[in-house]
Amino acid sequence: MFAVQGIYANGTVVLDEPVPTNKKYDVIVTFVKPLDHSEKDTEREKKIAALARITGIITNNDTTLEEARAERLSRQ
């Protein structure tokens, strides 16, 4: 058993570090305490928003990740 910290926001868990295995694991997610808003939280929220966009692309669209990336780059 090992632990990896992360954050939960908007229905998504984002880990702060890579998981040190490629095997499947049963997991238990423990909500420790609510976070005060900080600069670190803002960076995490950006990661969560990006993950949510990718998840939406994968689950709700026939667009490939490459096509979505190209579309995003064309909007910049």
Image (tube, rainbow, N blue to C red):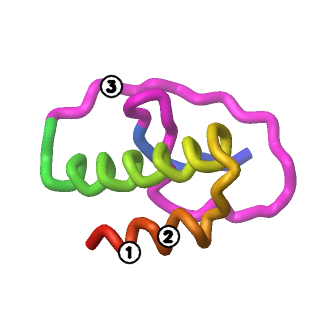
Please give the residue where the numbered disc 1 appears in the rendered image: 73
- 60 and 4: which one is in front? 60
Q: Which region is colored magenta? A: 8-36
Secondary structure beneath disc 2?
helix
Whether residue 42 sits left or right of residue 17 in the image: it is left
**Amino acid, disc 2:** Arg
Q: CA distance from mark 2 to mark 1?
A: 6 Å
Q: Crowding near pointer 3: few (<14 within 10 Å), some, many (20+)? A: few
Residue 69 has which mark?
Answer: 2
Residue 44 has which mark?
Answer: none
- 7 and 64: which one is in front? 64
Please give the residue where the numbered disc 3 appears in the rendered image: 33
Give residue 6's position: percent from left, percent from top.
Answer: 45, 46
Secondary structure beneath disc 3?
loop
Give residue 12's position: percent from left, percent from top.
Answer: 49, 36
Whether residue 23 sits left or right of residue 72 in the image: it is right
